[in-house]
Image (tube, rainbow, N blue to C red):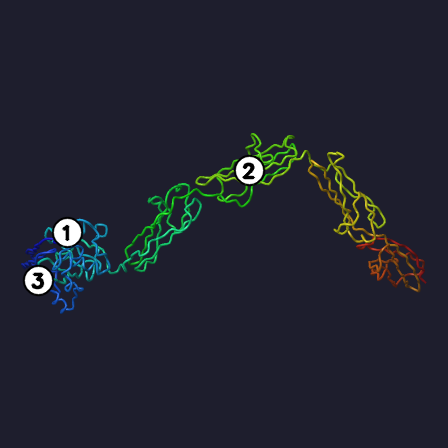
Amino acid sequence: MRSGALTVRWWSAVVAGVLFTSLLVLTGGGGKVDLRQTSGLTYLCTGYAGCKAAGYSDAGYGAVNSRMYWRMYPGHNCVNYVAYRMIKAGMSATRPWTGSGNAANWGHAMASITNQKPAVGAVAWYDAYHHVGSAGHVAYVEKVNSPTDIVISEDSWGGTFHWQHITTASGFWPSGFIHFRDKDLGPVLKNTVAPTVSGTPQVGQKLTANHGKWSGGPTVFHYRWTADGSVIPGKVAHTFVPTADQVGKKIGVVVTATHPKSTKVAATSDATDAVAEGAFKISAKPSYSGVPVVGDTLKASPGTWLPSGESYTYDWQSDRKDIPGATGPTLSLTPDLVGHKVRLITYASAAGFRTASRGSVETTVLKGQVKVAEPFTISGAARPGQTLTVTGSIEPTEEAITPAYQWYSGGQPIAGAKRASYRVRGADLGKHITVRVVFAAPGYLGATVHAGEPNNIRTPGKITIKTAGAKGRAAVRVRVAAWHVQHLSAKVRVRIADQIRFVKLVNGTALVRLTGLRPGRRAVYVHLYRSASVGSAQKNGYVRIR
């Protein structure tokens, strides 16, 4: 598009009393350029051929300037030349704004990227009547020497191609700089395959964004999730879990690709189906505490639900039928429930989720429970051949409640030992005797009790001693016999006067010698220490020392 002929004139300035006059005529897409020089403004070359010969490139524009770029007029034209340079830098062939293409409009149309900071690859923009005429002017920044010193290339309507060196002191500094495609911004980012959203659009189910495919080497992606096209505040991760607020809405994701040196570019995925209500999962079934007997109260435990239900409600059932009025967290067991199977139904509900229910196991209501009234104990001597008896009492004492006995020796059940009494055997020596009593009756919750003999079963040891005395010394032979015990090995202590010896029996026998005894008739004391299967015993005797 033609931007119109512009005429720029710089009139006289007095420097140190010397008059210096310079006239420059420019066109911002039309008009001529007078190649004179003023303070801070230097033309480095003129014309495509002249600039090429001087080492200044036209970026190939001279060979293709018969074409229109961004719908600008071809040929010598500032806007057509700069549009060509922007497209060559990677921008779209479509002008990035609508409306007037005159140079004066460029900075206004692209105000969001226009500032006072020069940069290589930026557009040097002149607003209407800013050193130029009403149509304005644009040029391409080739070099930045400092924030106040730049080199530009330009073409002009009715004029020709130039490179210029400009400073702020030149009186021709741009109105601003438009940063379409600065050379330090890096490659152009472009979405080639649209982002997608995978997963089930349901409350509580995770959706995952795939950023799609991009050209231009983006290094970082940012995500914004939408519901029916509206951005969901705060949701910026690549995954998103819909909540109750999104039920019935379609979810999408906007992916923004970034590169350290490029302009951000956003792309939007297709929307999912409408978000459905969530479905509860349960990891532990409902249950209840309490004893299922008349007069007791059962207390509900809702189970473990995922996600945690915001509220629970209950129904109690008898034989799979609702109990009238039993909708609270507890159930008092009444006589009319005896013999019937009760269970708990729990309903979980939460915003955005379908209400779910799950039942507990069933249990039969009983009319009573057997309890121990008097502790059970074992009486009798814990020796082979002796009888042990278990006693105690329960309540209630109905005849239908019968006990079942089982005796144990060393933790192993004794075959046939199923009465209230048990005659100790030799095989029980060194073992602990216990008994289990189970009480059961139809319609009652039974009970199991245990009782145990506090000591291991041991047999008495029978000690015999023989002594022989001599001058100042004595010999004592000890023999120990025990019922059902062979190869007895136990510890004994022998004392005569103040002489004491500790010895170990070998096969029930030990010989002890003592010296340093005074003459006379001396008492002999023998003590058998208790072992695993033999009880302790004591035996006394005499020996004559010469």
- Asked whether the beta carbons under mark 3 and mark 1 sit within 8 Å of each other, the answer is no
Q: Residue under label 1, please give it.
A: 104
Residue 398 placement (x, y as % from top left): 75, 34
Q: Is residue 299 left or right of residue 71?
A: right
Query: Which secondary structure, mark 1?
Result: helix
Q: Is residue 19 left or right of residue 244?
A: left
Q: Residue under label 3, please give it.
A: 35
Label 3 vs 1, first from the N-terminus:
3
Residue 342 in the image: above or below residue 172: above
Marking on residue 476: none
Spatial CA distance of label 3 from label 1 is 23 Å
Q: Amino acid at mark 1?
A: Ala
Residue 245 placement (x, y as % from top left): 39, 41
Q: Amino acid at mark 3?
A: Leu
Marking on residue 345: 2
Residue 341 placement (x, y as % from top left): 62, 36
Q: Amino acid at mark 2?
A: Ile
